[in-house]
Image: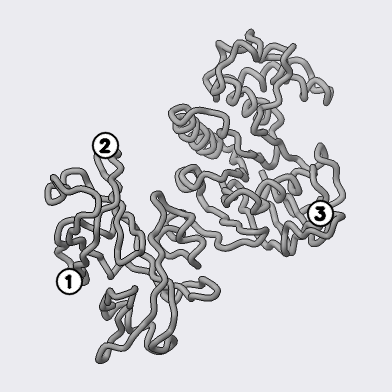
């Protein structure tokens, strides 16, 4: 396998629109890296530039240490799995898997060995004699992955391969693809994978590292836990996590030797762990964005000393089984709390508009610059 290096990569279309703005990124040899972001953030454009399906208008692209800007896709040592699978409908599964190898003049015995090895890895030996029209969506997706495996590429590229599957099958295929990557690594065939998705749940569960993109610019690259716990800016904070982080307009005010966050008429005293790093860099009265994850809002008192009670009115509840998403109104601002179902006793009988005391765990809050969204608490 091989690493992939993007150095000041740019994409400008003939009409002058600049889709990718000087991207610098190192994808490690054998790594599973995910590009994630909203529609139009250029994640698929970047993937197609790596594949050679989209021209590069600035910067340098290296695969395995070799500059590949001007190389055709077949010369780059990559294999791509598309959103629509792109299987040949008139060929059986076996022939779909073998087609590229036969075109390359691979000996028949080796073709058979590679095809059957891929089928075994993906548990689809029983599908080899079927036509694509006889396959379910998940089976067709496995065939598309198998066709990439038989090529033994240096880099696997996945362009939203699960988006056409239903929710249950999507979850199962996430596990299968992640296990496949680990199986190849454990067998001495580490696979470098670059995977594109707009689904942050896919990104968080599959990626060893995640690259968050917005408007053709990298916002943050890190392991899932760091993106979740220490987002670099308000965009990453709101995009990573489900339900998304509550982010409210606020301002900082002095309170003796500390600071309080003022949201409308609500004052929230910051714990010392948050105040100390702010006092040296953030002046009182500064406009900020206050962020708090839904799981850090409770309908019952917290034991932690940094928990503060606020009165908020109920909007509606989403019952998710073992937990409930409680949507609140805090002085005109919307909040979402993620609360275990067994902690809702205090809300029994309450209806839309009723007030209730909720506890905010301020030791877990985030503060972002009101203008550029950058985090103020590293």
State left or right for residue 310 relative to residue 349: right
How many residues crowd mark 1 within 10 Å: few (<14), some (14–19), many (20+)? few
Residue 208 rendering spot, x and y as whole percentages: 50, 49
Residue 30 rendering spot, x and y as whole percentages: 59, 46
Q: In percent of the image, x 13 and y 45: which residue is there?
A: 349
- What mark, if any, has residue 305 been given in the picture? 1
| Quadrant location, the N terminus | top right
Report the mark closest to the observer, 2 or 1. 2
Q: In percent of the image, x 21 and y 63: which residue is there?
A: 359
State left or right for residue 6 relative to residue 227: right
Label 2: which residue? 321
- Figure quadrant of residue 254: bottom left
Could you tell me if the residues under marks 1 and 3 are in contact, i.e. CB atoms within 8 Å? Answer: no
Q: In percent of the image, x 83 and y 60: which residue is there?
A: 16
Closer to us: 147 or 276: 276
In three-dimensional space, the C-alpha distance between marks 2 and 1, rounded to whole angstroms, equals: 30 Å
Report whether residue 29 is seen. yes
Report whether residue 378 is seen. no
Q: In percent of the image, x 81 and y 54: which residue is there?
A: 56
In three-dimensional space, the C-alpha distance between marks 1 and 3, rounded to whole angstroms, equals: 54 Å
Label 3: which residue? 56
State left or right for residue 110 relative to residue 315: right
Q: Residue furthest front?
A: 353
Residue 47 rendering spot, x and y as whole percentages: 69, 46
State left or right for residue 213 relative to residue 76: left
In the displayed structure, 80 sits above or below 112; it is below
Residue 22 rendering spot, x and y as whole percentages: 72, 64
For marks 1 and 3 on the same chain, the one whose residue lies earlier in the sequence? 3
């Amino acid at each position: 396998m091989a690493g992939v290096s993007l150095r000041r990569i740019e994409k400008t279309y003939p009409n002058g629109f600049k889709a990718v703005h000087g991207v610098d990124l190192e994808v490690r040899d054998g790594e599973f890296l995910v590009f994630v972001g909203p529609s139009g953030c250029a994640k698929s454009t970047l993937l197609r530039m790596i594949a050679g399906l989209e021209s590069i208008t600035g910067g340098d692209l290296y695969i395995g240490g070799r500059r590949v800007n001007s190389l055709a896709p077949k010369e780059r040592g990559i294999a791509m799995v598309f959103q629509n699978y792109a299987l040949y409908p008139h060929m059986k599964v076996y022939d779909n898997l073998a087609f590229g190898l036969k075109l390359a003049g691979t000996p028949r015995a080796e073709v058979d060995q590679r095809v059957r090895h891929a089928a075994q890895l993906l548990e689809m030996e029983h599908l080899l004699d079927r036509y694509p029209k006889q396959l379910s969506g998940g089976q067709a997706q496995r065939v598309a992955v198998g066709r990439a495996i038989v090529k033994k590429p240096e880099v696997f590229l996945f362009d939203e391969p699960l988006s056409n599957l239903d929710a249950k099958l999507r979850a199962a295929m996430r596990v299968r693809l992640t296990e496949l990557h680990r199986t190849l690594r454990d067998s001495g065939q580490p696979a470098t994978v670059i995977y594109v998705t707009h689904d942050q749940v896919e990104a968080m569960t599959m990626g060893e590292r995640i690259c968050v993109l917005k408007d053709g610019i990298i916002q943050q690259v890190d392991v899932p836990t760091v993106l979740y716990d220490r987002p670099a800016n308000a965009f990453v904070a709101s995009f990573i996590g489900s339900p998304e982080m509550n982010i409210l307009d606020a301002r900082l005010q002095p309170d003796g030797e500390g600071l309080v966050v003022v949201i409308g008429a609500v004052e929230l005293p910051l714990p010392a762990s948050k105040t100390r790093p702010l006092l040296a860099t953030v002046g009182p009265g500064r406009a900020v964005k206050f962020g708090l994850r839904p799981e850090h809002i409770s309908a019952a008192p917290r034991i932690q000393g940094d928990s503060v009670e606020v009165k908020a009115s109920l909007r509606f509840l989403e019952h998710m089984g073992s937990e409930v998403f409680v949507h609140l109104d805090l002085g005109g601002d919307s909040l979402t709390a993620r609360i275990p179902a067994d902690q809702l006793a205090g809300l029994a009988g309450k209806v839309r508009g009723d007030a209730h005391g909720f506890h905010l765990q301020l030791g877990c809050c985030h503060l972002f610059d009101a203008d550029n969204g950058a985090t103020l608490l590293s």
